[in-house]
Image (cartoon, grey):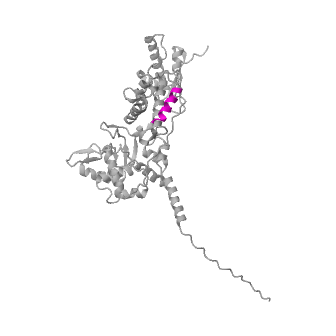
Amino acid sequence: MGRIAEPFTIAKRADSDTYHITLNPSCGLPVRVCNEWRRKSFKYFPDELADFRFPKSIKAAKPGAWALIAYLKKKLEEEGSARRVPVIDVTVGEWIKKFIELETSPRTGINAGENRPYSLNTLDSYKSYFNCHIKDDPICQLKMTEVEEEDVLEYISRLSIKKFSRKNGTLGGSRTFSAVIVFMRLAFNEYQRKVKRWYNPFQFKKAPKCNRQSWDALTEDEVVKLFQPGVLLDILDLCLCASMFLSGLRRGEIPALRPEFLDWHTPKIRVSNAWQRLDKKDKVLGPPKGKKTRDAPFDPILQDAIRKLWAENGQHEYVFIIKRKNGTLKTVGPALVQKRFKKWLARAGIELKGRRIVPHSSRHSLASMLEARGVSLRYIQDLLGHSNMKTTKIYLHSTEKTIREIGHKITEAIEAKPEKPQEQKPKENKILKFKAS
């Protein structure tokens, strides 16, 4: 007796912990429907089956597979035998515009299912890219089903020669140019996920790379100067400076720090929140950058500063609170940090000398000081909250410092006055005289 074919096949991806499913014709569904579900990830299950999107094992995935078969059979009964792969007949502009709003973006559900909700800062960037570089281009008038690779290449050409007023040049090669192309690829890839048999003109187009110029770091001696008397004038100055240079907190994480996130016993700081849209009035409290909670150092200098700050202003919902002259309280804003940071550098007598030093440079400085003292890169990566080691390496400037020190020594050697060679006196030939016995 022949073996009965399994109605479905479930396998685990080798490069991740996710599972994919293949429906076989023995499940009772038409071949064309089974082809739609060939090696397809569980995370693409319809919203009605959202509870089955992330199984932990093959055994746990099987109920989801049976639920999917039942769901598809029910859809066939409702839609009739004429059901085909749906083609979303929209223009390029209409499709890409969906991605600039949280309510309409096709990525919202996928990101939420992975517990990585959309950052509002990312949506604001997408909206800017669409309004400035996409919506008025001729490619937006084409239907998604009509776009060919040649149309994409022509759009990239138009974008690359577009004037970029801030740099008085063209957009090509800039960070914005790279980000716009990446955004377009995301939208086209998402359309391909919905329309399986559609040819994606971005399929073989690699995302352009942009050599991003990183911020510079202060040396260890310069960081010490910031804490000398006369530089930090009040206790809030000390709190902010210690949070930046000793704990590595970001600009949006400092005002979002709550008292319950301070572990006074270990001690450590639990970085769980950050303000998004920090520079705008409609700022929103959300997760830190990268959706990654981390532990930051809680140095005794910062501990004493916070205690003194609370003694002056009292303890409130957030750790760092400003007390106005009229007695009202408000949270620390980015403009205040930027303004005070410039004054710290001036009072400490730190000359920039062409370096790009901003408040975010405090994280670069902390990473470089730790690496110079032999701290492992893995620890520095966790401390800064980076998902990729490549990002952490951008923050390390100790190698540049070492090269600079070697260069200074070479310069000193070149500028040093050569010593006069000492005249060597002729050696006297000492003749040994032997006496015959």
Residue 16 x, y percent position in the rendering: 51, 33
Is 156 colored magenta in this rendering?
Answer: yes
Q: Is residue 296 above or below residue 34?
A: below
Residue 348 x, y percent position in the rendering: 36, 58
In-front residue for pair 279/266: 279
Instruction: Using residue 30 as the reference point, say whether residue 310 is left or right of it.
Output: left
Is residue 292 among the parts visible in the rendering? Answer: no
Is 206 colored magenta in this rendering?
Answer: no
Instruction: Using residue 229 as the reference point, say whether residue 357 is left or right of it.
Output: right
In-front residue for pair 338/402: 338
Residue 422 x, y percent position in the rendering: 60, 76
Q: Is residue 188 above or below residue 310?
A: above
Residue at 74% over, 84% down: 432
Residue 251 x, y percent position in the rendering: 36, 45
Specify the quadrant that holds the C terminus: bottom right
Residue at 47% over, 33% down: 159
Q: Which residues are magenta?
A: 150-162
